[in-house]
Amino acid sequence: MTHHFVLVLPPISPVGASAHYFWVLQKWLHEFKNETTTIIMPTYYKTAFYDQNRWEFGEWSKKFHQYAPTYLRNNDHKNIYYYPFLSEIENKSSISESFKFSVKNNCYDLFLFYKKTINEIKKSFGESLVLVSWVNNASLRDAAKKENIQLIFNEIGPLRKPYYKQTAYWDTHGVNGDTNVATLWASEKTPFKEWFTHNELHIQPETIRSLIANVSITHSTPHYPLGIALQIETDSNALVFNRGWNNLSLIEHARTRLNLDKILVRYHPNGKALYSGLTDRDPNPLVFLSNVKELWTINSSLGIEAIFWNIPVVFFGNSPVETFISLEENEKDIFYTW
């Protein structure tokens, strides 16, 4: 069976009428340039193709995300559906509230739009549709289930080049703080534990690190008792899965426990705000991790890197690896390998 893939960009951006996930669209158009696909997106993405100053057209994005830019014009891609005005979402008190609501709640008008659009695409391409989203979307999830359509949530993995073999993950439930990791672990842990007992000598954390990491880390004499890994302020992880924490409140909370000179803060490369205190700006995140005894984060992927290097970490928000934190010590190596 030949699948027909449908990219579903979020109906609303966390920063207003801005093509916030334009690089995802660029990557999609590059990878599927020789195939027919369908795209669902807000109308304001059309104007992004005419702005040559966007970072997605820059050398860093082209190299890291590995695409040649597409300068799509109005008639270059035939199978595009645009969102209508969605009053249930767009009439919220703020852009941030609208975005959070669209991620976590089934919005009836959005659900109906997806249902209608899915059925129109079916008429053209048959039943073998696969929906792909990079952002959690409760309405899309419910519409896909109602229409019995496969839905994949995609994300760049927590371990990234050039310091690791590049990773990614696909999840049938969601991304970031809303994955099905805990459900999968619950269903697979018994047979995996049995397999692990027969292979434990060959599959050690050190072995895994040697296979995945392109560099090593020295962690014998960390200079700071605590490191804090910050988020992008407008990322869905920081807005929706933060359990009430933000970058500033996390830093202030740390300062009630330790003096300023004991805390090292790691900015996210795409963060937009400045914070006081000692900061790490080294391009290599492993320099930061080697300098801290313990890591605090809302749910940055640096927290998963800390687990990878056996550095104690506290997640203040939702994280795909919360299960690891709650395990008994004798189970952590098993989960780590899994």
Image (cartoon, rainbow, N blue to C red):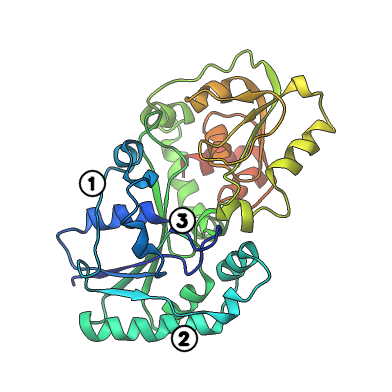
How crowded pointer 2 is (Cα within 10 Å; few <14, some 14-19, many 20+) is rated as some
Q: Amino acid at mark 1?
A: Ala
The picture quadrant where one finds residue 280 is top right
Return the residue found at the far right: 256
Circle 1 sits on which residue? 68
Local SS, label 3 = loop
Instruction: Give the residue drawn at x 46%, y 66%.
Output: 10
Q: Local crowd at mark 3 within 10 Å, few (<14), some, or many (≥20)?
A: some
Per the model, the C-alpha gap separating discs 3 and 2 is 24 Å
Please tell me whether mark 1 or mark 2 is closer to you in this view. 1
Q: Where is 280 relative to 175, above or below? A: above
At label 2, which amino acid type do we have?
Leu
Where does residue 74 sit, x and y in percent of width and height?
25, 68
Q: Position of residue 198 (x, y in %)?
A: 42, 39
* Residue 32 vertical position relative to residue 249 in the rendered view, above or below: below
| Upstream in sequence: badge 1 or badge 2 | 1
Q: Amino acid at mark 3?
A: His
Q: Position of residue 228 (x, y in %)?
A: 66, 33
Q: Quick one: label 1, few (<14), some, or many (20+) residues within 10 Å?
A: some
Residue 60 located left or right of residue 205: left
Q: Nearer the viewer, residue 245 or 309?
A: 245
Residue shown at 46% from the left, 49% from the top: 192
Query: Whole-Å distance between the Cαs marked 3 and 1?
Result: 19 Å
- SS state under label 1: loop
The disc, 3 or 2, on the residue closer to the chain's N-terminal end is 3
Q: Is residue 171 left or right of residue 298?
A: left
What residue sits right under mark 3 in the picture?
20
Disc on res. 112: 2
- Marks 2 and 1: in contact by CB < 8 Å? no
**Residue located farthest toward the top when viewing the structure as drawn:** 221
- Mark 2 residue element: helix
